Amino acid sequence: MPLSTRAQAGGPRQLFASTVAERVALARTQFFEEGVRPSGLVGEAVIQSWLRCTRAHADTRRSVSFEAVTPSRLHATLARNHELLQAAHGELAGMESALAGTDCRVLLTDAQGVIVHVTHHPAAAQQPILRSTARLGVNIAESVVGTTAPGIVASTGQACTVDGAEHYFECLRTMSCAAAPIRDVNGRLAGVLDLSIESRRFGFDAASMVGLHATTIENRLLVTQSPELLVLRFQASPSLLGTPLEALAGVAADGRVVWLNTAAARLVGGLPEAEPCNVEMLFGFDLATLLRIGCRNAAQPVRLASGLGVWLQARTPALDGIDFGHAVSVSADLPSSIAGPDESTAPAPVPPASSDAQGGDAGADDPSLRGHSRRLIEETLAAHHGNISNAARQLRVSRGTLYRRLRSWRESEAAPPA
């Protein structure tokens, strides 16, 4: 019996909504008309967004104007987010290909909510709201268009989904959207990845899909923004390396752990807030050992300082232009806590560089990544008796790169002290 019929017949009032739409409608009535917090009817993220929006927007029934920012601001925004767009390029193309048979639109915004990438869907004529919204340069921040998934993510940094009437403005109640954050090496919000659909519900788990792709973009952005860091890749299973589930860490030239991605923070417990964290404290290996691990192409089974066993790869930065994965080892033996699956495939050790090798031994006491890379070059040259061509071939760099590196060392040593 409908609620109105039961009420007229003197029956009890219906206390529970049976469908999602009824729960959201009841939540709006309680929040906007009765001033009651609708806990349990909609998510806490939506309630908090409604509270923020009531301070900026009085009328939930007014139409929303989706205006693009000025051309000069858009130009500056695209330039400022060049690294984000570069890291997301391949992933966005893959998402759009996978979603080509749906009515979904893929949106990427910067940290302030300005759209920097959008899918141009052929069904735009049947999507009047998305036709106005999904345009390059449109600002869809919460302060402008009210409660939306990308708006909530930009405000809170947490992934969320907003469905139908959960949107603050009633004109957006035909929309559904799911969004996830993308963070940079400083832990700040770099952008928001969003999936939106109009006049129908998602036919798949949009939250999981957008979260997976946002994680992949974030991992690529972290590596892109770390050209002078040693990047560690590790996980409990080697099959997870190279996937969105891999753990990543960035290590500076002084051995300081600069950043961890979400998976890495879960595995090692995160970075201490009070003081800088040394790589040996967190991983149980010094910088030189990690660089020797990087000399092996395959991931190596190691035990972290916590005792957790993982498979680890170390990739050196591009600061010297050297592919350490194909370079010779800088030490004859790895620590006993590192045992590769097949020790017979380990690279052969080389004799230590002599003091009269090209470039001298100025890097012998330098524990930084530059010092380690210099020692590796010197030892490779010594192993090839000073032959530049053979050493460059072993290091997988051009002869010109090696000549420039040696010349820069000579010039720096010839320069008078400051």
Image: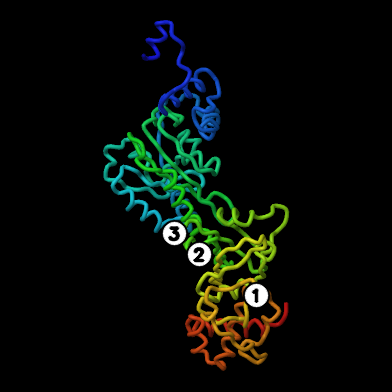
Position in image of residue 218 (x %, y %): 50, 55
Task: Locate residue 319 relative to residue 7 in the image: left or right.
Answer: right
For the question of whether residue 22 can be seen, the reply is yes
Q: Secondary structure at mark 2?
A: helix
Which residue was labeled with disc 1? 335
Q: Amino acid at mark 2?
A: Pro
322 vs 107, left or right, is: right
Mark positioned earlier in the residue sequence (3 or 1): 3
The residue under the point 44% across, 22% down is 17
**How is the rendered protein coloured?**
rainbow
Q: Which residue is most to the bottom?
A: 385
Give the distance between the C-alpha atoms of the residues marked 3 and 1, in whole angstroms. 38 Å
Looking at the picture, how far across and down is residue 386, in whole percent?
Answer: 56, 92
Q: Residue at x 53, y 35 (%)?
A: 45
Vertical side of 406 occupied by 25: above or below? above
Q: Position of residue 196 (x, y in %)?
A: 38, 41
How far apart are labels 2 and 3 at the CA level?
27 Å
Is label 3 or label 1 in front? Answer: 1
The residue pinned by badge 3 equals 86
Which quadrant is home to the N terminus? Answer: top left
Q: Quadrant of residue 335?
A: bottom right
Q: Mark 1: which secondary structure?
A: loop
Please say if 24 is above or below 279. above
Return the mark for residue 401. none
Instruction: Name the residue beneath numbered marker 2.
Output: 238
Which of the two discs, 2 and 3, labels the residue nearer the N terminus?
Answer: 3
- The amino acid type, in three-letter code, at marker 1 is Pro
Q: Secondary structure at mark 3?
A: helix
Closest to the observer: 276 or 145? 276
